[in-house]
Amino acid sequence: MNLRRQLVLLSLFTLALPWAGCQYLRQVDKALAQGQMQTLEATGSAIAARLASAPHLIAPDPDRSSRPAGAQLYLNPLQQAPLLDGYGEEWRLQQLTPRQLPGDDGEPLAQITLGRHDRQIYLLLTVSDRSPSYHDPRTGMVSSGDTVELFTANHRYTLPVASQGPASAMEHNARSGFYERELRLRGRWTSSPQGYQLELALPFALTGGELALTIADRENSRGGTPQRQASTLPADGRPGALIEPIPTLQQELEHFARPHLRLTVVDQEGFVIADSGQDNKPGDTPAPVADTAGDSGRHWLKAWLYRQILGTGKLPPLPEDRYPASLTHNRETAGQWFSSPRSGEGSSDERIGAVSVPVITRADDIIERPLLGRVISAQSASAVQSLTESAAQRLWLSTAGATGLVLLLLLGYASWLSWRIRTLHRAARNAVDASGRLRGDFPRPLVKDELGALNRAFASLLAELDHYHQYLRSLASKLSHELRTPLAVVRSSLDNLNAGELDADSRRYAERATDGSARLSSILNALSAATHLEASISQADREEFDLIDLLQVLTQCYADAHPAHRFQLHSPEGPKPYIGAPELLAQLLDKLVDNAVSFAPADSEITIALTETSETFEIAVSNIGPPLPGGFGQKLFDSLVSVRDDGGKSGHLGLGLHIARLIADFHHGHLEARNQDSGQGVTISLTLPR
């Protein structure tokens, strides 16, 4: 991984800044939410304390606490009187929650909804009966099939079930012993695929404030014991009380009202007896206040993003017409967060906080203080949510800008640093040519940092190496010049010595000294020739000639000069013009062929091959023989380097291939020595640009 990518990867740690900001916002949102819940609890506790000090406001009927739970029926306040047609469309429009009445077997048998408008009580009863038994007048019974019985404080009415038509209420007259029609009860029956339905109206004064209902499901229309029953009548036979909002409690609750705050008081069984803060729909339990201001301008995606940032998670939805039992059925203070029932309609996920505080009497002489009811305070968290979302938006913009700026700065710095390193790498790679010479001046930057110091150290090191290389290049010439005079003295002395009379041993030693001086003279001549050849190569003239013609002539000459070896030329058809120095190229090939002949066994084949591409020519000389030792692929062309194992007797100094490389450099070419794939020989190739 390069340096720029490392710095970019390191810069990703700047993303910890928005993460830390989100964690801080979560803590702020949590603290604000806790503060709101504490405020709601304080409000509910104040109202509960007020009602506990005046229990007649919340429990005007002292006998109510002694009645069994589930016997009471709730009267929903109705905005207008429903039409008694048996279909109940007006009830469904008001979205009132019915009360479920299970049968003896525990399965749902019926559901009932009660309401009051003015002085009339209205009832909607829906019974689930796949095979209802309707009243048969021919039996002479008051009700021979399914029946519905109403119980008030002083009366008991029997209503025979009919498939369609008006309802008739029959009351038993104890004095006469007969059933009499009660005309003050008006209603109508309708049938449905699930069973039948009754819509009924009766005066409130007729109930005496108490009402109970019993449904009898018979198998046929011949009377008999019902096979299923559902009833709200307690075991003692006394109907339960009718519960409805209390006006005095409503007035008292209005004193605590505040904008966007919903206050609800429920009795022991969860029936709403006072409600403040919103035009509530009639029902058993109310829907809390939700501040809908600004909902239209908040997109669901934005709300989802804020919910993810703040970590609020998915809250349980609050039903539109009631609070859950966790708030309406408890003796302890309870609080819970909900999502608005409108959250699923494309609006934002609005949170609603609700706290339920019990109202318990303060009578000290009672061991177990009775529960009079509960005060539920609810409020939308839109203000808190808007505050945190606004802070989250500012945090997001600021951290995104800061992170982007840091990323750009780090990327720019990484690019600049990477450019400097690449520049230093290119300069170090191209500082020395193939012959070991320094190519120009190594750059010395003025930046005073570690990288600049490294660059200057490289420049100083290469300058020292160049001085040492110049010394080595001139060493051969100096040695050749300095050794010629003493060598001439030695040779003349040996000649004079050989001219005199010597014994056999002295003669042998003198001849050996003469051979050694001759070899030393040839070495000095080779060193001098190499030095002069290097200087003469740079002054050679270039001309255009045919490479194939040159190779054909040279191959024939090599075959004549080395009859102990076979020479083979492989080249493409046609002339191949090239601009260069043919004499120098011939000298280069002489060195390569001489090297191949030195290592190839007698009667072996030496191949000269010419190949071409669109940009280069390649001349390869291949021979069979020992492979190159490891690491000599490029060292073979350096000065005074040889791989011959002859003990130095042949006089090879390793200058031939070095001269060949000088000629290749003159033509901007490249020499390469490699072992053949078979491992039985060596190929030296010359690549020339076209």
Image (cartoon, rainbow, N blue to C red):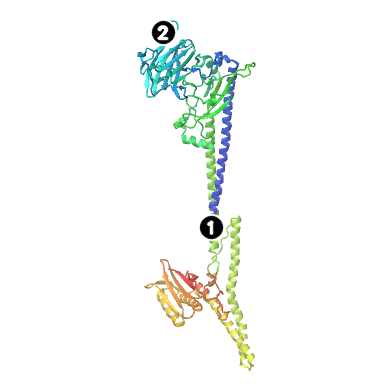
Q: Nearer the viewer, residue 687 or 262?
A: 262
Mark 1 or 2: in front is 2
Asked which secondary structure carries label 1, the reply is: helix
Instruction: State the CA–CA distance, disc 1 to disc 2.
Output: 115 Å
Dot 2 amino acid type: Phe
Q: Is residue 244 visible?
A: no
For this rendering, which residue is in front, 340 or 419?
340
> Which percent across, then down, holds residue 575?
38, 73
Numbered badge on residue 216: none
In percent of the image, x 44 and y 70: which residue is there?
618
* Disc 1 target residue: 422
10 Å neighbourhood of mark 1: few (<14), some, or many (≥20)?
few
**Depth order, front residue of 187/570:** 187
Q: Position of residue 245 (x, y in %)?
A: 50, 16
Relative horizontal placement of residue 490, taking residue 97 as reference (left or right): right
Q: Earlier in the sequence, mark 1 or mark 2?
A: 2
Is residue 468 shown left or right of residue 547? Answer: right
Please report contact status of discs 1 and 2: CB closer than 8 Å, yes or no.
Answer: no
Q: Do we see residue 661 in this rendering?
A: yes
Q: What residue did someone put label 2 on?
A: 178
Choose top left, top right, bottom left or bottom right for residue 124.
top left
Return the residue found at the far top: 175
> In this rendering, is residue 33 above or below 598?
above
- Quadrant location, the C terminus: bottom left
Q: How many marks?
A: 2
* Residue 344 vertical position relative to residue 665 in the rendered view, above or below: above
Q: Secondary structure at mark 2?
A: loop
Q: Position of residue 432 (x, y in %)?
A: 54, 66
State whether residue 245 is above or below residue 541: above
On screen, residue 175 above or below 588: above
